[in-house]
Structure formats: C-alpha cells, structure tokens
Image: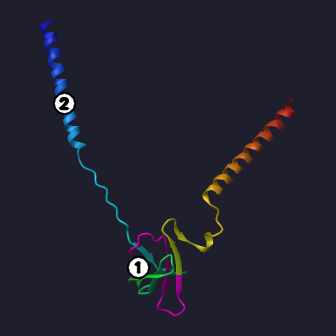
Amino acid sequence: MGERREMRRGCVIVIVVFMFFLLFCFGIASAHRIYVVHRIADIEVYAYFGGVGGETPCRYADVEVYDDRGNLYVTGKTDENGKFRFSPETGVKTYKIVVKANLPGHQAETLLNLSGGYSDSSAEGAIGLPMRILAGFGYLMGIAGIAMLYKSRKATKEA
C-alpha cells in the first residue's frame, strides 16, 4: 500500500508541475500587446480606351477631382498605365473625377461615393435592399400560396 501511495503522490506532483508549466506558458504567450493601426488608403483611378481590341490605357491624360461641394480638390495626370492616385480628404464622401485625354473630344467623368462605391447612371432605377428583401418574401408567399391551392384542390378531388 505504501508503494501505491507514493505512486499517486508522484503522479499528483507531476500533474501539478505540468499544469503550472502550461499556465505559465500560456500566460506568457497571451501577454503580448495588441496594436491597432489604421490607414486611409489612396484612391486609384484607372482610365482606359475601350473597344473591339480590348482596353488601352489612357496615358498622360489630365485628371481633375472635385469634392462634394464642387470645389476643385486636386489635379494631375495619369501615368503610362492610365492610373492616377490621390489621397481622400477626411469628411468628404463624394468625389467627381473628370479625365480629359490628349485627343480632342475624349473626356469621361464618374462620381465616386466613398460611403457606397461608385455611381453609375444605369443604376439610378435600381431598388434598395429593404425593397428587394420585401419582394423576396412576396415571391416566397406567392409560391407557398400556389402550393397550398394545388394541395387543397387535390384533396377536394380525392374526397
């Protein structure tokens, strides 16, 4: 019996030492500080000529960026790849970007909405998310109604 007691005591000591080891290891590992860093990235504009042959970068075109109050915010030129970058101003949610190519009559503009992406004239008639959800429920209710009508008619015929 004495040997069993010594074996139990030895096992308990090994388990306690192992638990303290785990406790200290995890305590050290979880003691690192967490740093949160944020950066507002530059906005990159890509201008290109599109057509049958694909897309060709609009090189060295004049770019004008207007803020949401209509004031000229920044000007510049696209690079050899048709790209132009600028840093957004804090508090401005909408930019109008005008690109004028070196060829006469070649000009394009877009409205960049930082709170929701870009604005496209083809998307003006689109319905919002709440209305799409409501329409989805309407479709499901219609399908359920048709299924119930079919089932009730089938039950009436059998009776």
Is disc 1 placed on a helix, strand or loop?
A: strand
In this picture, residue 27 sits left or right of residue 154: left
**Number of numbered labels in the structure image:** 2
Q: Going by the picture, which residue comes out furthest to the bottom?
A: 104
Residue segment shown in magenta: 80-108
**Neighbours of disc 1 within 10 Å: few (<14), some (14-19), many (20+):** many
Is disc 2 placed on a helix, strand or loop?
A: helix
Q: Please give the residue where the numbered disc 2 appears in the rendered image.
A: 20
State whether residue 2 is above or below residue 141.
above
Disc assigned to residue 33: none
Q: Amino acid at mark 2?
A: Phe
Task: Tell me which corner region of the image, top left, top right, bottom left or bottom right, holds residue 125.
Answer: bottom right
Q: Please give the residue where the numbered disc 1 appears in the rendered image.
A: 84
* Residue at position x 20%, y 38% in the image: 25
Q: Could you tell me residue 147's position as x and y percent?
A: 75, 42
Which mark is first along the chain, 2 or 1?
2
